[in-house]
């Protein structure tokens, strides 16, 4: 099951409208400060009732994307007001994410995941280690070019978050699931890239199995930085970017 199907497994009309408008905002088609067309115009353009449109506007307002005021209309809010950890907003950044968004995502992962791997090495139970091993073996068995490549990658990282013994880490993994799936799609750019990443994934697993927190931290950091470099190359970003200056 993909991120979008998990988020929109049972779409109703106002959810579809919210998805459409949300994607336009996140992608920059509608920019901060832009005034949305009137309710009547949007209803006609989107071919939906005003009731469905109003519900969609409520959803987007709750996510911090827009605000509605009497006389001035409905306006797109600045990015700083968006709830970037909202699963929908995260998923709307894909499949063509802005490089700045990706950089922020990986910077956040570099802060969290190496330390989480170290925590897992110290705290994991035997059953949690078995789950990490199983997800790694599933990565090895994943057929190149299929969804299994990035879904097993996601499950591997989520298993480590779970083994950290910190409920906040586990919740964070659920929150950023959509973004992780999107980034894994980008970073699994072909059979070669998938195969090249396996040794570092196995090294993370082995460090956790050996209860070696420093090794787990260092290898996870190496794995994430290699993934950052790979995505940068896939997106055609120049080498002299902030991606190379992450000192974490």
Image (tube, rainbow, N blue to C red):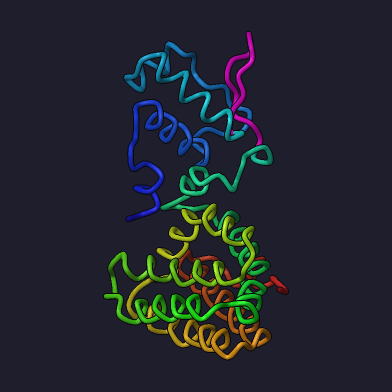
Q: Is residue 47 left or right of residue 85?
A: left
Look at the image and say whether residue 71 sits in the magenta stretch. Answer: yes
Residue 159 location, x and y as percent?
A: 49, 70
Residue 163 location, x and y as percent?
A: 56, 72
Tell me if residue 236 comes above or below residue 226 in the rendering.
Answer: above
Look at the image and say whether residue 16 sits in the magenta stretch. Answer: no
Q: Quadrant of residue 197?
A: bottom left
Quarter of the image for the N terminus: give it: bottom left
Q: Which residues are magenta?
A: 65-78
Quarter of the image for the C terminus: give it: bottom right
Q: Residue lying farthest bottom?
A: 210
Tell me if residue 81 comes above or below residue 37 in the rendering.
Answer: below
Residue drawn 59% across the image and 72% down it: 239
Residue 155 location, x and y as percent?
A: 43, 68
Q: Quadrant of residue 75?
A: top right
Residue drawn 55% across the image and 44% down it: 86
Residue drawn 44% across the image and 80% down it: 130
Q: Is residue 166 left or right of residue 92?
A: right
Q: Residue lying farthest right?
A: 247
Residue drawn 57% across the image and 88% down it: 207
């Amino acid at each position: 099951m993909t991120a979008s199907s998990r988020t929109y497994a049972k779409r109703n009309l106002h959810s579809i409208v919210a998805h459409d408008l949300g994607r336009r905002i996140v992608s920059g088609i509608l920019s901060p400060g832009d005034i949305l067309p009137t309710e009547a115009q949007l209803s006609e353009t989107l071919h939906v009732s005003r009731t469905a449109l109003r519900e969609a506007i409520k959803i987007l307002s709750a996510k911090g994307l827009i605000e509605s005021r009497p006389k001035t209309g409905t306006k797109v809010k600045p990015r700083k007001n968006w709830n970037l950890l909202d699963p929908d907003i995260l998923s709307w950044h894909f499949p063509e994410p802005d490089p700045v968004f990706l950089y922020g995502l990986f910077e956040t992962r570099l802060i969290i995941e190496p330390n989480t791997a170290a925590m897992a090495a110290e705290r994991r139970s035997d059953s949690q280690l078995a789950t990490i091993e199983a997800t790694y073996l599933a990565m090895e068995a994943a057929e190149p070019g299929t969804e299994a490549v990035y879904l097993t990658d996601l499950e591997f990282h989520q298993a480590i978050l779970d083994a950290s013994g910190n409920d906040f880490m586990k919740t964070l993994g659920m929150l950023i699931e959509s973004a992780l799936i999107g980034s894994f799609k980008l970073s699994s750019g072909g059979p070669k890239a998938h195969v090249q990443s396996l040794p570092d994934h196995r090294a993370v697993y082995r460090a956790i199995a050996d209860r070696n927190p420093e090794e787990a931290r260092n290898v996870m950091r190496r794995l994430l930085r290699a993934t950052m470099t790979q995505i940068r190359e896939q997106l055609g970003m120049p080498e002299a970017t902030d991606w190379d200056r992450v000192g974490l």
